[in-house]
Image: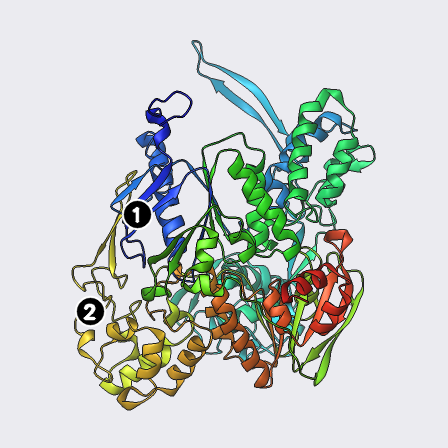
C-alpha cells in the first residue's frame, strides 16, 4: 500500500523484477530467478558454471532479439538473425546494452579515436578552425581517399540533355600506405637461395617441394626462365618475369597451367589469410619473410601532407591524435572559440570520460586491435557514460579485468553511477572488491560444465559470505607472503627498453623463479615484456588474444589431441585415420559432420536442429562400428577430459601421446570440459587455460603469461598458483603480468612499473621480493598488497 495516499500502487509501478523461468541454455539446468530492476546485481561462480549463459546468452540475447523484432521485415533482413534462447518464461526485460570483453576489430584502420567517435569530432573542429583551410571534415580523415572525376552525364528530366560534370572529394588518406601507417615489404632472401638454380631447389618456402607440379615445376618448366641458371645471374627481364609477371597461361607436360610472378603468388597464398589461422610453421615463415615498417611518406600518422599542414595554434590533427587523451582534454579546454562551443563541450566530455575510466594514458591514434580485453571493454563504456537513457539494462563482463587494485574503486563508482541514474546493472565478476558493492548477488555452480548450471545462492553480499557455497567459502580468502623465496639461477637482461611509454628501462628478469610484473593499467608492463622478452629464443608466450575457431573446432582439435586418437582408432581397426574426422571422410553426409542442420529463415531467427541421420554424433553409421577399448569415436568425443585421461592411460586404448595432452588439460583445471565441446561455447578463462595447456607441451625454458587469472574464480586461483609452482619446480622460469594480489603474494620476485600510467609511467619503481615491497610501501602496488595480506 502507498503510505502517502493509502491507495494501491499504480499498475505501471509493479514491474520491478526481471523474471527468468526454466533457462536451459548451454549447461543451465532449468534455472529460475528473479532479478531486481534499478539495482546492481553481480553474478558469481567458478569459471564455466553458467554465468555468461544466463546473463549474456539468455537475458541479454532475448532483449536484443525482441528489439530486432520491432523493426520491419525489410530492415531485419539486413540484421544478424538471433535464435530465441531456450527458456520457458522471460518477463520484465528492458533494453539491454552489452559491454563485453570482445576484442575490438583488428582492422588496421580502426583506432581508439574512430571507435569512440572522438576522431569524427576532431575532424569537424579542424575543418572549421584549421589554418590553412584545406576542406571539409573528410579532408582530415585517413580513411577517405581523395577522388577526382570528370565526364558527361545524361539527366533524365523532360527533355533529356547531356551535361558536363566534374567531381572532387578531398580526403586525408596518405597515398603511400593507404591510411594504414605502415608499409609491408617482403624479404626475398626468405623465399629463395639466389646462389642456386630452380633445378637445384632454390626455393625455401614451406611446402614448396622440388617435384610439386603446381608450384616449383611451373616456374622451372614454364619456358620463361632457365631452370639451370642460378637466380643471382638472371637478367633484368628474367627477374621481372620471375618476381612480378602477370598471370600467364603456360603448358607443362601437356597440361595447361597458370604462371604467376612469385611476389603476387606469395601474397595470395600466404599473406591474404588470417595470420592466426595459419599452421605454426607457416606463420613463423610469414613473420620472417614480411616486415612492416613505418610509412616514410606520412611518418606513421596515416594522413596526407595537406591534412598535416593544417593547424590550430601550431597543433595538427596528427599531433592531437598522438597526445595521450588526458593532455588532449586539457588542450581542448584551453581553446576559446565561441563559434564551435557545443562541439568543444561534447569533445571535452568524451575525452574526460577516458580519464575518468582510467584510460587517460591512451592516444586516439592507438590501433584498436592492440587493446587488451579489459581496455576494449572500458573504451566501449565511454559511449554510455554520458548517456541520458534511463531504465536500461547494462550488462558487463568482468569490468575489472586488467585493472590494478588502485583502479577498481573507480570502476565500482562508475557502475554505481549507472545504477543511480535508474538503470539495471548486471555484472559477471570474480573480484571480491566489486562483488562487495552489489545490491544483489546470484551465485551459480556448484561446479563447472555439467557440474554447474544451478543457482546455489541468491541474496545480499552478507548472505553470500555466510553461505556454504564455493564463492561464500572463498570470499574472504587471503594469500600470505612466502616465508622462503626461491633463488634465481640466472637472469634475462633487458637494457634500454623504450617501446611505447617506457623510458629506457634496464632490468634483470631472474630465471628459475616465479616473477610477477605489476603496475597500474598503462604503466608499461606489456610494453616491457612483449617488447623485450617475448620473441626471444626459448620464450613461450601465452597472451590474451582470442582463439580463432569455428563451431566445428573443439578442445580435441585445438590441442592436437585428435591426431593420436585417430591414428589409434585406425591402427586398431586397420582402416584410414581420415575416417575418424568429422571434417573429412568419416563425416555424416546429411549435416557434413556438424551434428546439427541449420535452416535459414531469412529475417526470422534461424533454427538449428539435431541431425536426424547421425543423431548429433557427426559421423557416418559405418564409422561408428569401429571401436577402440570398447568405445566408438563419438563416445570418445563425448567424454570429459578427466574421463578420457583415465581411458587413454591404460588397457586396450592406451595411447601415450593422447594421454600427455590430457594430463596437461587436467593440470590447468579443465578436467570437466568434454572433448567435443565447440570452442565457441568456452568462457574467456577456459580459453586462456586451454592455450596454456597447449603451450605447456612446447620446448621452452621461459613461460610468459599475460594476466592468467582473467576469468578465474577465487577458488581456481589457488589451483593456478599450484600449476605455476609445478612449472617452476620442473626447471622452467615463469614471468607473469598480473594485478591479482594473490599471485603477487605468491611470487619469488616482483618488478613494479609506474608510478602512474602513460607518460606518468614507464619507469621501474621497485624490484625485489614481495615481503620487501610490503615493508617499503613505496608504490601503489606496495600499499595495496600490504593491505591485502594484512601487514
Residue occupying the point 77% across, 33% down: 310
Residue closest to the eye, 116 or 17? 17
105 relative to 712, above or below: above
Q: Secondary structure at mark 1?
A: loop
List x then y, in percent, for residue 136: 66, 27
Q: Is 654 displayed left or right of 308 in the figure?
A: left
Residue occupying the point 79% across, 25% down: 336
Which circle's residue, 2 or 1, is located before the other in the chain?
Answer: 1
Q: Secondary structure at mark 2?
A: loop
Instruction: Sort mark 2 into few (<14), some (14-19) or many (20+) by Cα contacts within 10 Å.
Output: many
Cα distance between the residues tagged 2 and 1: 30 Å
357 relative to 448, above or below: above
- Looking at the image, which residue sits at the far bottom? 651
Instruction: Say which of marks 2 and 1 sits in front.
Output: 1
Q: Is 296 displayed left or right of 738 in the figure?
A: right
List x then y, in percent, for residue 425: 47, 42
Label ID, residue 620: 2
Residue closest to the eye, 156 or 543? 543
Residue occupying the point 75% across, 20% down: 338
Label ID, residue 85: 1
447 relative to 138, above or below: below
Tell me, yes or no, if residue 139 can be seen here. Answer: no
Instruction: Sort mark 1 into few (<14), some (14-19) or many (20+) by Cα contacts within 10 Å.
Output: many
Q: Is 66 displayed left or right of 403 in the figure?
A: left
- Looking at the image, which residue sits at the far right? 314
Q: Quadrant of residue 66?
A: top left
List x then y, in percent, for residue 90: 30, 41
List x then y, in percent, for residue 168: 63, 28
Amino acid at each position: 500500500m502507498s503510505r502517502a495516499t493509502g491507495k494501491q500502487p499504480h499498475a505501471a509501478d509493479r514491474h520491478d523484477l526481471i523474471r527468468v523461468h526454466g533457462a536451459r541454455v548451454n549447461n543451465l539446468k532449468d534455472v529460475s530467478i528473479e532479478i531486481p530492476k534499478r539495482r546492481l546485481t553481480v553474478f558469481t561462480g567458478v569459471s564455466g558454471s553458467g554465468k555468461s549463459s544466463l546473463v549474456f546468452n539468455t537475458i541479454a540475447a532475448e532483449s536484443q532479439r525482441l528489439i530486432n523484432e520491432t523493426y520491419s521485415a525489410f530492415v531485419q533482413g539486413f540484421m544478424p538473425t538471433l535464435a530465441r534462447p531456450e527458456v520457458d518464461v522471460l518477463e520484465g526485460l528492458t533494453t539491454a546494452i552489452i559491454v563485453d570483453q570482445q576484442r575490438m576489430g583488428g582492422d588496421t584502420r580502426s583506432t581508439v579515436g574512430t571507435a569512440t567517435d572522438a576522431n569524427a569530432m576532431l575532424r569537424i573542429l579542424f575543418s572549421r578552425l584549421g589554418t590553412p583551410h584545406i576542406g571539409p571534415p573528410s579532408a582530415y580523415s585517413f580513411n577517405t581517399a581523395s577522388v577526382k572525376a570528370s565526364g558527361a552525364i545524361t539527366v533524365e528530366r523532360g527533355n533529356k540533355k547531356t551535361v558536363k560534370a566534374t567531381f572532387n572529394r578531398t580526403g586525408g588518406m596518405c597515398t603511400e600506405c593507404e591510411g594504414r601507417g605502415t608499409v609491408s615489404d617482403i624479404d626475398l632472401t626468405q623465399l629463395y637461395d639466389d646462389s642456386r638454380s630452380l633445378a637445384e631447389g632454390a626455393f625455401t618456402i614451406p611446402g614448396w617441394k622440388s617435384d610439386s607440379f603446381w608450384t616449383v615445376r611451373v616456374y622451372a618448366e614454364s619456358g620463361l626462365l632457365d631452370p639451370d641458371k642460378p637466380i643471382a645471374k638472371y637478367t633484368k627481364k628474367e627477374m621481372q618475369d620471375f618476381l612480378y609477371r602477370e598471370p600467364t597461361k603456360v603448358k607443362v607436360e601437356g597440361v595447361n597451367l597458370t604462371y604467376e610472378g612469385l611476389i603476387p603468388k606469395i601474397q595470395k597464398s600466404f599473406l591474404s589469410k588470417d595470420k592466426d589461422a595459419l599452421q605454426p610453421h607457416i606463420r613463423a615463415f610469414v613473420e620472417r619473410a614480411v616486415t612492416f615498417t613505418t610509412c616514410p611518406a606520412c611518418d606513421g600518422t596515416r594522413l596526407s601532407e595537406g591534412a598535416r599542414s593544417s593547424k590550430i595554434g601550431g597543433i595538427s590533427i596528427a599531433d592531437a591524435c598522438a597526445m595521450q587523451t588526458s593532455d588532449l582534454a586539457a588542450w581542448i579546454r584551453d581553446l576559446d572559440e565561441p563559434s564551435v562551443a557545443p562541439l568543444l563541450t561534447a569533445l571535452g566530455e568524451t575525452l574526460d570520460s577516458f580519464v575518468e575510466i582510467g584510460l587517460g594514458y591512451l592516444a586516439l591514434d592507438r590501433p584498436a586491435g592492440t587493446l587488451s580485453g579489459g581496455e576494449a571493454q572500458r573504451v566501449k563504456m565511454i559511449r554510455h557514460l554520458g548517456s541520458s537513457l534511463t531504465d536500461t539494462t547494462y550488462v558487463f563482463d568482468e569490468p575489472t579485468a586488467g585493472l590494478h587494485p588502485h583502479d577498481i574503486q573507480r570502476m565500482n563508482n562508475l557502475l554505481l553511477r549507472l545504477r543511480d541514474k535508474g538503470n539495471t546493472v548486471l555484472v559477471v565478476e570474480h573480484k571480491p572488491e566489486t562483488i562487495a558493492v552489489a545490491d544483489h548477488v546470484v551465485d551459480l555452480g556448484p561446479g563447472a560444465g555439467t557440474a554447474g548450471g544451478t543457482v546455489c545462492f541468491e541474496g545480499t553480499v552478507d548472505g553470500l559470505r555466510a553461505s556454504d557455497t564455493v564463492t561464500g567459502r572463498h570470499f574472504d580468502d587471503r594469500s600470505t607472503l612466502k616465508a622462503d623465496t626461491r633463488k634465481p639461477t640466472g637472469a634475462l637482461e633487458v637494457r634500454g627498453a623504450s617501446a611505447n611509454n617506457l623510458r629506457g628501462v634496464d632490468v634483470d628478469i631472474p630465471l628459475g623463479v616465479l616473477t610477477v610484473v605489476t603496475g597500474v593499467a598503462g604503466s608499461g608492463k606489456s610494453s616491457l615484456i612483449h617488447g623485450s622478452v617475448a620473441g626471444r629464443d626459448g620464450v613461450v608466450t601465452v597472451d590474451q588474444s582470442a582463439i580463432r575457431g569455428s563451431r566445428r573446432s573443439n578442445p580435441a582439435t585445438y590441442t592436437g589431441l585428435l591426431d593420436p586418437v585417430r591414428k589409434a582408432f585406425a591402427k586398431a581397426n586397420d582402416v584410414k585415420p581420415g575416417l575418424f574426422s568429422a571434417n573429412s571422410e568419416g563425416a555424416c553426409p546429411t549435416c557434413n559432420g556438424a551434428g546439427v542442420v541449420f535452416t535459414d529463415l531469412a529475417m526470422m531467427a534461424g533454427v538449428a536442429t539435431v541431425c536426424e541421420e547421425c543423431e548429433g554424433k557427426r559421423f557416418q553409421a559405418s564409422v561408428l562400428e569401429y571401436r577402440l577399448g570398447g568405445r566408438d569415436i563419438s563416445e570418445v568425443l563425448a567424454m570429459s577430459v578427466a574421463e578420457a585421461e583415465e581411458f587413454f592411460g591404460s588397457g586396450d586404448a592406451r595411447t601415450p601421446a593422447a594421454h600427455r595432452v590430457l594430463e596437461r588439460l587436467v593440470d590447468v583445471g579443465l578436467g570437466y570440459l568434454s572433448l567435443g565441446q565447440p570452442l565457441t561455447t568456452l568462457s574467456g578463462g577456459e580459453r586462456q587455460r586451454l592455450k596454456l595447456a597447449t603451450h605447456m607441451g612446447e620446448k621452452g625454458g621461459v613461460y610468459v603469461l599475460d594476466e592468467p587469472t582473467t576469468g578465474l574464480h577465487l577458488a581456481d586461483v589457488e589451483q593456478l598458483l599450484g600449476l605455476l609452482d609445478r612449472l617452476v619446480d620442473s626447471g622452467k622460469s615463469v614471468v607473469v603480468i598480473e594485478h591479482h594480489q594473490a599471485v603477487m603474494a605468491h611470487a619469488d620476485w616482483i618488478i613494479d612499473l609506474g608510478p602512474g600510467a602513460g607518460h606518468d609511467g614507464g619507469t621501474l619503481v621497485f624490484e625485489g621480493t614481495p615481503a620487501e615491497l610490503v615493508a617499503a610501501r613505496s608504490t601503489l602496488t606496495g600499499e595495496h598488497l600490504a593491505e591485502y595480506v594484512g601487514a
